[in-house]
Amino acid sequence: MTSMRRNLVRVLDGETLSPPPIWLMRQAGRYLPEYLETRAQAGSFLQLCYNPELATEVTLQPIRRFGLDAAILFSDILVIPDALKRNVRFNEGHGPVMDPIDEYGIATLSAESIFAHLSPVIQTVESLRIRLPAPTALLGFCGAPWTVATYMVAGRATPDQAPARLFAYRHPEAFERLLTLLADVSVEYLVAQLDAGADAVQIFDSWAGVLGEPEFEAYAVRPVARMIKGIRARRPSAKIIAFPKGAGLMLKEYRRRTGADAIGLDWTVPLDFAFELQKDGPVQGNLDPMRLAAGGSTLDEGVDAILQRLGDGPLIFNLGHGIIPQVAPENVQRLIDRVRGISES
Ligand code: 1CP
């Protein structure tokens, strides 16, 4: 395939684009009526993730509606524990659940044959690259080892990942084994996504923010650095965004220590600090998703503040976390128009 330098990739290479490329975390999802329709057709949420035709369809839905600069593969970070036979289920209204893992489970955990299980996801990437408009970048993704491990240890969603934090103190060796296994499996998985046509990949460390300083180094920085080194050893030109949500001041050294091309910023990151981080390379973010839900001038002011402070450097415009189901689709259009300078006022 002739290589076309899509806007998102240009920014990941350090270019400043005006307007900046924009995509939104959870841009496919329950705020879109067409998503709810396709999800109902699929049966369960996981069946949707493993159905290349329907997963392609829901990935394309926000692209058709809004013409975003990037599509993100429709899947979930928890397909990895599912492939590791942890019996993942998504129960309506209760979030994900799975069989909690203990130190004995970790000792016998095997990554064998997980790629057969994940092949429908890779097929989705292939079908997306064929179906997407040429200028639209395609992002692959996975969860960071720490974030995936938190769900595996607790067996469910928790507010602060207390079960995994406690487990890591009590069983440091078992926990290290789990993180290393997840990192190595995730390298293979992301390389497969890149080979199938993803322009870049994002590593979601949604729970990085609950870690103290030494734990952040051991569980958020080191495993992600291992992953990025592993990916680059195989695909030297791979473009990688890392999103350590809630990392706060620990963002400062994060890019250098992990080797990520771009860092994703949540909405609590002050714009002056984001500006400093941008001197070292591209940043992505960081509108509060609640501003998007609120809409109107609240939305416009949030957008303008980000563009004013970060618009003269390499920026990928995004939310600071995922879209919530209550968002009106018109607000998403308003956001995109505002970023692109197509505003009414
Ligand atoms: O009802 C439904 O349809 C399920 C809702 C849903 C959706 C739309 C879940 C369950 N996952 C997804 C898709 C998803 N998940 C994407 C698709 C692409 C897109 O962004 O459009 C992506 C990138 C994810 C990644 C993901 N899953 C993360 C990292 C990002 C983040 O939100 O922090 C995490 C933590 C998950 C786990 C997960 N999956 C689903 C839920 C509700 C959760 C969070 C559980 C919790 O509260 O801890």
Image (cartoon, grey):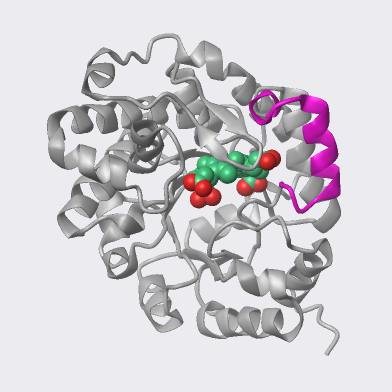
Q: Is residue 156 left or right of residue 59?
A: left
Residue 3 in view in this figure: no
The C terminus lies in quadrant: bottom right
The N terminus lies in quadrant: top right
Q: Quadrant of ligand 1?
A: top right
Against 271, is 177 above or below? above
Q: Residue at x 64, y 74 (%)?
A: 291
Q: Residue at x 41, y 83 (%)?
A: 272
Q: Residue at x 13, y 30 (%)?
A: 173
Against 90, is 272 above or below? below
Examine the image and state in which quarter residue 132 appears.
top right
**How far across and down, in percent of the image, does residue 86 sit?**
44, 20
Examine the image and state in which quarter residue 19 appears.
bottom right
Q: Residue at x 63, y 27 (%)?
A: 46
As rendered, which of 148 and 198 lies closer to the eye?
148
Q: Is residue 221 left or right of residue 328?
A: left
**How far across and down, in percent of the image, does residue 262 sit?**
44, 58
- Which stretch appears magenta? 29-48
